[in-house]
């Protein structure tokens, strides 16, 4: 009986090896039939990976150049080469730098070109230009503060109803709510 078991075992092993060989032959046939497609897809994948790596390396280099330019500008705000490098490598950071520098220097003329931007910097530049020109600014980012300023201007002009309507728009959770409450008391007859 043990010889019979051994023969069955050997037969099963040969059947398993035969199946492996059949699979290998089928795989080889598929490879021969679709060799061009397989290599084309492999090359395309390698090209896409290479381009992504190159693009991310290029972006990192640009950001690094922009950061070093910004550090140079912090030390010397008049450095034209650093300003040009910042503008070329990161225009958004360039606009932010121009905005912060203009506000710091209280330079209304430098804020005017930034007003036309359709991003938060443009809104903030318009607001600060008005504030530096001693007018109540209008901003969606400083909305509550601009309402307080407009209410204060209305109070100075003797228009208490307008001031009340502006102050009513400020929520109680606002950081300027306490100032709004003080101004509301000034509108009481």
Image (tube, helix red, strand yellow):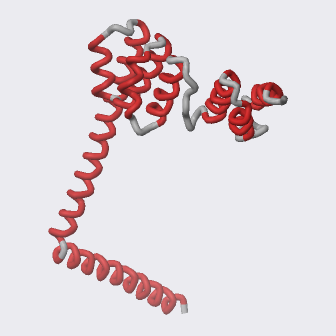
Q: Position of residue 84 (x, y in %)?
A: 28, 19
Quarter assignment of residue 139: top right
Q: Pick the residue in front: 89 or 102.
A: 102
In this rendering, does residue 169 appear at all?
Answer: yes
Q: Residue at x 27, y 57 (%)?
A: 45
Foreground residue, 48 or 170?
A: 170
Q: Nearer the viewer, residue 3 or 172?
A: 172
Quadrant containing the C terminus is: top right
Q: For this rendering, which residue is in front, 125 or 39?
A: 125
Instruction: Report whether 31 appears left or right of 137.
Output: left
Q: Does residue 178 appear anywhere in the picture?
A: no
Which of the image's four quarters has the N terminus?
bottom right
Q: Position of residue 93 (x, y in %)?
A: 40, 27
Q: Residue at x 66, y 34 (%)?
A: 144
Dividing the picture into quadrants, the one containing residue 180 is top right
x and y percentages locating residue 67 in the rendered image: 39, 22
- Residue under the image location 54 percent in, 88 percent down: 2
Q: Residue at x 70, y 41 (%)?
A: 169
In the rendered view, tell whether residue 25 sits above or below residue 8.
Answer: above
All told, the count of numbered labels is 0
x and y percentages locating residue 83 in the rendered image: 32, 17
Please indicate whether residue 132 sits to the left or right of residue 151 in the image. Answer: left
Instruction: State whether residue 99 is above or below residue 7.
Output: above
């Amino acid at each position: 009986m043990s010889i019979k078991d051994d023969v069955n075992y050997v037969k099963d092993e040969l059947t398993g090896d035969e199946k492996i060989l059949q699979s290998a032959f089928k795989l080889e046939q598929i490879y021969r039939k679709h060799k061009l497609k397989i290599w084309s897809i492999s090359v395309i994948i390698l090209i896409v990976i290479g381009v992504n790596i190159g693009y991310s390396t290029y972006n990192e280099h640009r950001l690094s150049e922009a950061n070093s330019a910004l550090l140079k500008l912090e030390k010397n705000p008049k450095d034209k080469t650093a300003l040009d490098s910042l503008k070329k490598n990161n225009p958004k950071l360039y606009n932010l730098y121009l905005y912060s520098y203009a506000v710091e220097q209280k330079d209304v003329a430098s804020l005017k070109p930034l007003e036309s931007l359709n991003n938060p910097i443009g809104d903030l530049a318009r607001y600060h230009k008005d504030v530096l020109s001693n007018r109540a600014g209008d901003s969606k980012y400083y909305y509550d503060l601009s309402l307080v300023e407009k209410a204060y201007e209305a109070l100075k002009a003797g228009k208490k109803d307008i001031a009340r309507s502006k102050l009513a728009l400020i929520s109680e959770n606002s950081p300027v709510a306490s100032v709004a409450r003080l101004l509301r008391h000034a509108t009481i007859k």
